[in-house]
Image: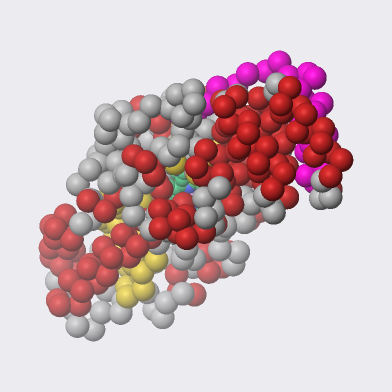
Amino acid sequence: MDWDKLKQEMKDAAWDLGIDAIGVASPDPFTTLKERLIRHRVLGRESGFEEPDLDKRTDPSQLFDQPKSIIAIAVAYPSKLKDPPKSEPGARRGIMSRSAWGEDYHKVLRNRLARLEEWLKERVPSLRAESMVDTGELSDRAVAERAGIGWSAKNCSIISPELGSWVYLGEMITNLPLPPDEPVTEGCGTCTKCIDACPTNALVGPGELDAKKCISFITQTKGMVEDEYMRKIGNRLYGCDTCQIVCPENRGKNWTRHPELQPDNELAKPLLLPLLTIGNREFQERYGATSSAWRGKKPIQRNAIIALGNFKEASAVPDLIGVLTKDPRPVLRGTAAWSLGRIGGAEAQRALSEARGSEKDEEALAAIGFALDMMKHETKDEGAAD
Ligand code: B12
Ligand code: SF4
Ligand code: SF4
């Protein structure tokens, strides 16, 4: 078999298979990545969403019998809404990160990898392959970098010279000895816009993230959020795009060719109030097919409550009092207390004082106390994200 020729044919076929960038990496162990991951763990900077076994993360031969190559793919997604609905007083809206617009990317990329596998199998019937997207053991970014899809940037993203960073990544380990590609030579140069723009200073150095400080991570947690971070969440409901929006490499880049990745404006930038009381079935119907639903509805509802507080949306006070007094989940009651404290006013204060007498959950009670205190001292006024 002429592997060079097969690789070139695969590259030529990729576009028609719905793949926007493709490259080949050697399956050698990722030794510098391993050192990096150990350091990351020791410093307590992991999110907890990563595969915990660092040997599996960095040695493809632990996942696959005699791997010969890893094919990396990228699928580009939209970064702009067409005629986005306005967020205005009385009708405030939250924002989903671009990686959660359209259909769940795990499904879309698995579909592309399955098509690619079929294409290869037709040419090499002895093909063995194992594909992964996000939830697999490997570092999708490290594989993409080695396969020449893009460089590992200061905002941690893989930036493709042609596509920017609005790309999802996936890979396929194979038994085919395809010749590897070279990593790209471009880089960030002296730019530091992402590090400067990060609202929580989560980018602690170029390409170094303290995931626990990252708003993207915080929006996906389920507990109470600290006051400092609630203020910085702004109106983000899931994920954070700030360090990519400010990136000059993304200027003018908006990828729209995949119909299943096209956003629905009402899901990408939804009204906040209806989210407070959305039922399980309705949540599944609306968000079940997107990548934002994997942690259930609670984090998104909590973030909607936070956003109303950050907007200081006085018209939301009755609904927030409803959450404070009736919601069975202490985290949501506590967050509603914070939001009412941030909005302020006599009605909010009365409701908080009453709730202080009846609330049984310790954490929610502490949040009520904090909110009442905050009403006395509130001076700051951070804006919303989008
Ligand atoms: C855990 C995780 C998160 C965590 C932690 C993110 C992080 N930066 O570590 C949280 C929840 C915060 C998160 C957020 C986001 N994520 Co995420 N996430 C992952 C996941 C599952 C693992 C990442 C990981 O292991 N991180 C640990 C770090 C240390 O390793 P790494 O980034 O994989 O590898 C790089 C570094 O190690 C670095 N490196 C290696 N050696 C050295 C040495 C030195 C000195 C330095 C400085 C760096 C360095 O180079 C490697 C390659 O870039 C991957 C999927 C996967 N299986 O890989 C998706 C993934 C990285 N996420 C993705 C996306 C889209 C996002 C968000 C943009 C979503 C959003 N809009 O909110 C944000 C971006 C936040 C950011 N600035 O990174 C995409 C990235 C696509 C791209 N173009 O790069 C991935 C690849 C999912 C996918 N399959 O498409 N994510
Ligand atoms: S995703 Fe947001 S919080 Fe996280 S590093 Fe980027 S700008 Fe900072
Ligand atoms: S904003 Fe600048 S430093 Fe950050 S990723 Fe983009 S080019 Fe690199």
Is 373 drawn above or below residue 75 in the view shown?
above
Q: Is residue 383 magenta?
A: yes
Residue furthest toward the bottom?
Answer: 126
Residue furthest toward the right?
Answer: 357
> What residue is at 82 percent from the left and 46 percent from the top?
359
Q: Is residue 92 magenta?
A: no
Task: Mark yes or no: residue 359 visible.
Answer: yes
Is 332 drawn above or below residue 4 in the view shown?
above
> What residue is at 84 percent from the left and 44 percent from the top?
358
Coloring scheme of the render? secondary structure
Instruction: Please name the predominant secondary structure of the magenta segment in the image.
Output: helix
Q: Is residue 303 left or right of residue 179?
A: right
> What residue is at 69 percent from the left and 31 percent from the top?
340
Is 77 drawn above or below residue 41 in the view shown?
above
Is 344 drawn above or below residue 41 in the view shown?
above
The region drawn magenta spans 363-386
